[in-house]
Image (cartoon, grey):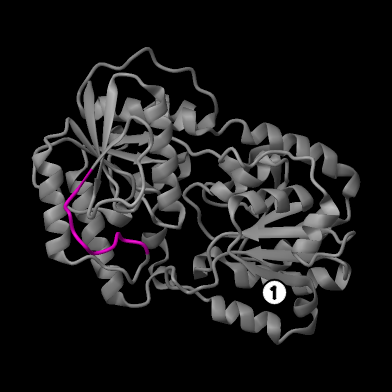
Amino acid sequence: MIHIGVDATCWTNDRGYGRFTRSLITALAARRGDFRYTLVFDRPPEFAPPPGVEAISADLDASSAKTADATRSPLRMLKTARRAAAAKFDVFFYPAVFSYYPLPARTPCVVCFHDATAERFPKLIFPSRLNSFFWSVKTAAARLQSTRAMTISASSARDLENILKIPAGRIDIITEGPDAAFRPMDIDRARVRAEFDIPADAPTLVYVGGFNRHKNVLALLNAMKKVARARADAVLVVVGDLSGRGFWDNRAELLGAVKDDAALSKCVKFPGYVPDAALAELFNAADAMVFPSLWEGFGLPAVEAMACRLPVLASNISSLPEIVGEGGKFFDPYNEDEIAACVTDFLNAPKEWASMRARAGAQAKKFTWERAAELAEASFRKAARLPPRTPPKPANAIARVNTGR
């Protein structure tokens, strides 16, 4: 058995890093091959790990890294690192640079660099130069310690090579996938719309994600002013955590922009955080998702929407063309007029919606956590310098890039 240690300090993270860690490890454990997994926490977990997965901790009282403000002390990281090193794993896996700490051992390491967005847009990501500096130091240390660099799209692989200067031969591309909750459903459309305060017959768009500045939600709101002039009945539901517990964002500016504009106040809804089950129902009751991000490493909300057969109107840059494929339409996220035109053209062509829904559903089927686990195992084998198993057949463009490296 190949023993894989897993940095689990971001397991409870309520952003994409946490979901990625939980979903991937659960899928890896379900394969029941020649790997076994141990989660390394900085405190004893308050929940049972997935079946077949062990858990150890540094027995610390402090909470796991959950937000940008929940910094971990050097002593806390040192004790966790020592606990991981003492276990003498065959390979140690960091599911995200976000929670990386140096491992004081010669153990081969696989580090997942989800993207290089922070390096592209430091002024949009970090509240100060000091935050940016600390991030760059941590990323450099992770890059030096990594035996293999994992990432989640061909777009991100190019950024790892060109921006982070990681050699292409050390990069392994895996994928992500939607949770089982996201699927086409026979729902009471009127009930779901009423729960989100959406008129029964209103053409409805959904945004799902964070409110960090690079998510470009303000540009979407400005574009909706133009959409409202052409389609006064259109509604935009902006789904995301409004608590302020997350990374540095501009949620106050977004809420203020809607409050101060009569047209936006009428057509934009902010329901806050929405659990997966309710979000899947909203996707099934909506007409399209809009994803105006300036950069995405993958764009999981787009796949979750397409898994519900919801077309995605997305930025034409970063990973989104690769992920959305024929499941939607694209626009230049830096051009508010083009965003508005893309949305308006979609709303004015309802006869095309059925075929777009079919294409979205077909595109979503290319992405699964089972496929992600298969590709992750191949990365672990490379890190441990073990011969590969029979190369898996590529299931999509991401896999084809991966097997070509």
Image point 37% across, 32% down: which residue?
51
Rendered-image quadrant of the C terminus: top left
- How many marks can you see? 1
- Whether residue 345 is visible, yes or no, is no
Asked whether 214 or 1 is in front, the reply is 1
| Residue in the picture at 25% in, 69% down | 133
Q: Say which quarter of the image contains residue 20.
A: top left
- 61 in the magenta segment: yes
**19 to the left or right of 225:** left
Q: Amino acid at mark 1?
A: Asn
Measuring from the top left, give residue 132's x and y in whole percent. Answer: 30, 69
| Disc 1: which residue | 222
Q: Residue at x 51, y 57 (%)?
A: 295
Percent position of residue 172, x then y: 35, 34
**Where does residue 263 sit, x and y in percent of width and height?**
80, 79
Quarter containing the N terminus: top left
Q: Quadrant of residue 266?
A: bottom right
Determine the main secondary structure of the stretch shown in magenta.
Answer: loop
- Relative to 233, does residue 82 appear above or below in the rendering? above
Q: Is residue 64 magenta?
A: yes
How many residues crowd around disc 1 within 10 Å: few (fewer than 14), some, or many (20 or more)? Answer: some
Image position, residue 343 (x, y; %): 77, 59
Q: Is residue 388 left or right of residue 307?
A: left
What segment is highlighted magenta in the picture?
Answer: 56-66
Badge 1 element: helix
Question: Is residue 33 positioned above or below 242 on the image?
Answer: above
